[in-house]
């Protein structure tokens, strides 16, 4: 992932991106949340909401009902398997990460402060293993293959947390920035985490989506850099609305995103690469 780390170090608001491929998905994708690339397999987490949570008179939220999916695809986007995760009110999967052998997936209640369960799904056998639970909404997780530590973010990533692989919390720090809410992140080595996210802001013509990329020093407890990504999907969403991943394509970073829902005319996995400097 050195190319990805180098790219993030060199990003600026002036960085240009160009399309590098589109992969339409021909199955019900619901509301995608995270993406991870594991060799010749693509993993896509998604929440299927059967009953949306509702605000209560006391200011809380009802739990709602739904199903947590982890879709397994080949490199052409063909659905190979659908691993269903979660239990009861815990049905909302978040941003995911591949650590070289397993895909780490948080499944949470669909509300701030809700409980979460953290899974490691074997990338070969697809066997899910619950690793630990957290008394908070965990919106994404990554596992650093160098240290074995698991990093994650709360609802909207207003706080960062770090655990051992069996769930012992070893770090927690508030997010000092409010630029975007990180939705999907991945470890890129050296204690660094790359994140994609979105902030919905009021605008003169209605809500406005701001997208961007963040570089987080999870080991040092700081946000190292953040940059806007002003590119939009066919359905009008910022590219980093939810699923976000980076791969090294022969020394060139490749961005993978899937911002559109299944009921918005279908989901497509989009690939982008930075335009070479001239």
Image: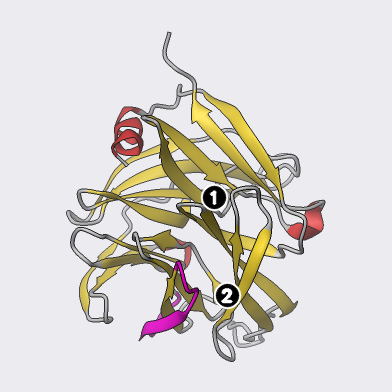
Give the mark toward the camera: 1 or 2: 2
Residue 239 lies in what quarter of the image? Answer: top right
Q: Secondary structure at mark 2?
A: strand
Q: In 3D space, how far apart are the residues under numbered discs 1 and 2 (Cα atoms)?
A: 19 Å
Q: Nearer the viewer, residue 131 or 37?
A: 37
* Disc assigned to residue 46: none
Q: Nearer the viewer, residue 44 or 236?
A: 44
Residue 137, image x, y percentages:
45, 76
Question: Colour scheme in the image?
Answer: secondary structure
Q: Residues within 10 Å of mark 1 (few under 14, many from 20)?
A: many
Q: Secondary structure at mark 1?
A: strand
Q: Quadrant of the C terminus?
A: top left
Residue 117 visible in image: no
* Disc assigned to residue 199: 1
Residue 133 lies in what quarter of the image? Answer: bottom left
Residues rendered magenta in the picture: 123-137
Q: Residue at x 47, y 79 (%)?
A: 127
């Amino acid at each position: 992932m050195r190319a990805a780390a180098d790219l993030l170090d060199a990003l600026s608001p002036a960085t240009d991106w160009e399309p590098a491929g589109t992969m339409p998905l021909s199955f019900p994708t619901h509301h995608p949340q995270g993406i991870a690339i594991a060799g010749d397999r693509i993993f896509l987490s998604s929440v299927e909401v059967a009953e949306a949570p509702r605000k209560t008179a006391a200011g809380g939220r009802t739990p709602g009902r739904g199903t947590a999916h982890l879709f397994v695809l080949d490199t052409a986007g063909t659905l190979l398997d659908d691993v269903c995760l979660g239990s009861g009110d815990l049905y909302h999967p978040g941003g995911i990460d591949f650590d070289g052998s397993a895909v780490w997936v948080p499944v949470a209640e669909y509300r701030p402060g809700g409980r979460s369960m953290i899974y490691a799904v074997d990338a070969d056998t697809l066997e899910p293993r619950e690793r630990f639970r957290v008394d908070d909404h965990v919106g994404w997780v990554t596992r650093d293959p160098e240290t074995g530590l698991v990093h994650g973010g709360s609802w909207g990533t207003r706080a960062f947390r770090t655990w051992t692989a069996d769930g012992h919390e070893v770090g927690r720090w508030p997010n000092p920035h409010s630029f975007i809410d990180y939705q999907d992140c991945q470890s890129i080595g050296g204690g660094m985490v790359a994140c994609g996210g979105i902030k919905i802001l009021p605008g003169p013509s209605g809500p406005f989506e701001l997208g961007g990329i963040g570089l987080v020093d999870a080991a040092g407890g700081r946000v190292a850099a953040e940059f806007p990504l002003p590119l939009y999907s066919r359905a009008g969403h910022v590219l980093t609305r939810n699923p976000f991943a980076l791969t090294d394509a022969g020394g060139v970073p490749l961005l993978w995103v899937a911002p559109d829902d299944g009921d918005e005319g279908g989901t497509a996995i989009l690939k982008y690469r930075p335009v070479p400097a001239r």
